[in-house]
Image (cartoon, rainbow, N blue to C red):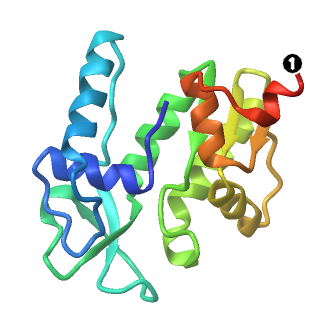
Amino acid sequence: MLLLELWQIIFLTFKGYKIGKSLVEENSRKIVENIYAEAKKYNCNIIIPEDSNVSTNFEGTGKTKKQDTVEENEIILDIGPKTIKNIESIIDHSNTVLWNGPAGYFENKNFSTGTTAIAKKISENTAKKSLISVLGGGDTISAINKSRDKFAFTHLSTAGGAFLEFLEGKDLPGLNVLK
């Protein structure tokens, strides 16, 4: 599973990378420690961005930077080309992808490259029947629709939080009625 969007910033912070003016949730360290412990327990790899597309504001254009070169006045707004290639390779070697959340600030087309590239790769592999793809979250769907490309996915869920809770095994009243 790929953890993107806000979580990528939290993981970068946890690993000691500078994130400039990027937003990060307070008190997330314990959550990340638990995620790493669970990943180790189940032999899962957590991939964090190698490079990012950064800017000094949300309306601007971006420039690609390695994670260790982000400056204090910059905001990480998308994943960079090396990270995109890495994620595409992971998708190519996967049988199932669960995706919840865009890879960047897709509202500005300058920072939608990562999200669009991931959507295209997942869609290509789904169309070739080499991949089961499950996408969740209103922002994910919004980002895909904004691209105006035609994509093929196995399942789309607009309820991101409920999607994640279902994956956690929690009871959801709307689904319980259908059982």
Front residue of 32 and 144: 32
Quadrant showing the C terminus = top right
Q: Whole-percent x and y of residue 177?
A: 87, 28
Q: Residue at x 33, y 61 (%)?
A: 52
Give the left or right position of residue 21, taking residue 170 as reference: left
Q: Whole-percent x and y of residue 157?
A: 75, 43
Give the left or right position of residue 84, taking residue 76 as reference: right
User: Dot 1 lies on which element?
Assistant: loop
Extreme-left residue of the structure: 16
Using the rendered image of the protein, determine whether residue 64 is visible from the camera's viewpoint: yes
Q: Which residue is mark 1?
A: 179
Q: Whole-percent x and y of residue 88?
A: 52, 38
Q: Quadrant of residue 138?
A: bottom right
Front residue of 45 and 117: 45
Q: Whole-percent x and y of residue 87?
A: 46, 39
Q: Quadrant of residue 99?
A: top right
Using the rendered image of the protein, determine whether residue 127 is visible from the camera's viewpoint: no
Q: Residue at x 53, y 21 (%)?
A: 93
Q: Sort mark 1 into few (<14), some (14-19) or many (20+) by Cα contacts within 10 Å.
A: few
Q: Is residue 86 above or below residue 139?
A: above
Q: Residue at x 79, y 48 (%)?
A: 151
Amino acid type assigned to the residue bearing label 1 in the image: Lys
